[in-house]
Image (cartoon, rainbow, N blue to C red):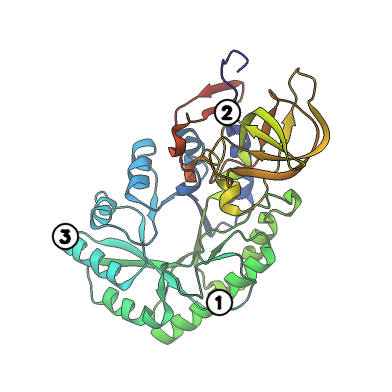
């Protein structure tokens, strides 16, 4: 790093920290639960390699992600969710067959049936339900109990069941219930899921069917601005363990977790290249920006910042500084009014919790700046890969 002629701009991923975190998640999870990784959070191959031996499989949401996992983890069990699946994507998911297709609409259900009938194969499906919300407080990103492109409304579920029952090409594996994201309150999340389970039990009794597996999605939150208030995974798992069988009905549960699994293993580093004062406010312009790390903009938060001082004497001390990138837009802000003890060009900002929805959701090509470097750390080894 010290030999580089250009200012630092890079992601660093601690693969040992990732493995330890996921191992702890698995240890807490009841035996009747499966843990899948939501690839959309970060599809970097070295992360996938670590997660392949720790998770039960991967959840993909596009044909591109499906091909990516089949390339780097060809033996992995796969789930395929998300609205608007193309016919070509559904065909790719059935040949060879994946673990389950998550059906998002009646039209998609009929399309899967037609493809399976044409190809003379049985399609494993789970129906995603958009159930009314009951218990548990809602978060700021909700996909259930509200008009949504996700899932089939309860009012249309009986029609979906009829299609399934009348088809020898559709194998019903269970239900999918990913309802919200960014939930940092484990008790509220648990209350919501228990409410859904009671609702499903009533549906089973009314419509005479049984869902042997329920995919409860993810949505476990990372408290970027309050790091002591992350989702309490151990207490949530204890709630699952204590579920009465009148609610669980001997079912197996699946979780597809993205953000909460990989966020903590990544750091985004950007070197200060300019420092200026404007109308009494200090700005630090750093190498990179939201085209590399869109998360703060997407979440509308001021991201935590740590400063690594270089050898140059500070230009400012004991000031509040707004951290921006190199883009020609006033929206290229990563943190506002950060208390800084000392700062000068050449210092490096470290932005933690950058291992999920960082590079993967960013608009890489805007202004054609070069991409950041991606470094992976495991045991005593550090290496770079192009992502």
Residue on which the image places disc 1: 133
Q: Residue placed at 76% from the left, 17% from the top?
A: 311
Mark 2 to mark 1 CA distance (whole Å): 43 Å
Query: Which quarter of the figure has residue 136?
Result: bottom right
Residue 376, quarter of picture: top right
- CA gap, disc 2 and disc 3: 51 Å
Instruction: Answer yes or no: is residue 169 visible.
Output: no
Whether residue 171 is situated above or below residue 292 in the rendered picture: below
| Location of residue 262 in the rendering, given as x and y in whole percent from the top left corner | 57, 43
The front one of 273 and 355 is 273
At a point 59% along the width and 38% down the height, the residue shown is 18
Q: Earlier in the sequence, mark 1 or mark 3?
A: 3
The mark nearer the N terminus, 2 or 3, is 2
**Which residue is tagged 2?**
9
Would you say the residues marked 2 and 1 are in contact, meaning their CB atoms lie under 8 Å apart? no
Residue 276 point in image, percent of width and height: 71, 33
Q: How far across and how far down the image is residue 217, in percent?
A: 51, 61
């Amino acid at each position: 790093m010290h030999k580089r002629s250009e200012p630092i701009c890079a992601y660093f991923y601690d693969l040992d920290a990732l493995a330890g975190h996921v191992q702890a998640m698995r240890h807490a999870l009841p035996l009747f639960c499966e843990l899948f990784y939501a690839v959309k959070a970060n599809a970097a191959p070295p992360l996938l390699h670590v997660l392949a031996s720790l998770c039960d499989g991967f959840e993909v949401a596009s044909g591109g992600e499906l091909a990516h996992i089949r390339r780097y983890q060809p033996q992995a069990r796969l789930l395929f969710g998300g609205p608007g699946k193309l016919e070509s994507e559904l065909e790719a998911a059935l040949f060879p067959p994946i673990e389950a297709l998550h059906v998002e609409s009646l039209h998609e259900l009929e399309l899967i049936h037609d493809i399976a009938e044409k190809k003379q194969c049985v399609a494993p499906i789970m129906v995603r339900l958009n159930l009314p919300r009951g218990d548990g407080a809602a978060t700021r990103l909700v996909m259930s109990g509200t008009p949504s492109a996700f899932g089939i409304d309860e009012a249309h579920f009986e029609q979906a069941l009829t299609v399934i029952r009348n088809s020898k090409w559709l194998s019903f594996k269970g239900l999918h219930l990913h309802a919200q994201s960014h939930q940092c309150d484990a008790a509220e999340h648990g209350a919501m899921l228990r409410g859904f389970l009671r609702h499903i039990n009533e549906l089973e009794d009314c419509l005479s069917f049984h869902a042997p597996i329920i995919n409860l999605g993810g949505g476990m939150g990372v408290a970027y601005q309050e790091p002591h208030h992350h989702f309490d995974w151990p207490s949530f798992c204890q709630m699952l363990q204590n579920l009465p069988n009148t609610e669980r009905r001997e079912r197996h549960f699946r979780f597809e977790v993205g953000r909460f699994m990989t966020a903590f293993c990544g750091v985004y580093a950007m070197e200060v290249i300019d420092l200026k004062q404007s109308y009494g406010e200090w700005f630090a312009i750093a190498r990179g920006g939201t085209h590399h790390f869109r998360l703060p903009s997407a979440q509308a938060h001021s991201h935590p910042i740590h400063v690594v001082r270089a050898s140059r004497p500070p230009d400012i001390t004991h000031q509040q500084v707004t951290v921006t990138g190199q883009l020609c837009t006033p929206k290229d802000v990563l943190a506002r009014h950060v208390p800084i003890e000392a700062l000068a060009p050449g210092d490096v900002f470290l932005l933690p919790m950058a291992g999920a929805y960082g590079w993967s959701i960013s608009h890489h090509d805007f202004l054609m700046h070069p991409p950041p470097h991606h470094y992976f750390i495991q045991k005593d080894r550090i290496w770079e890969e192009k992502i």
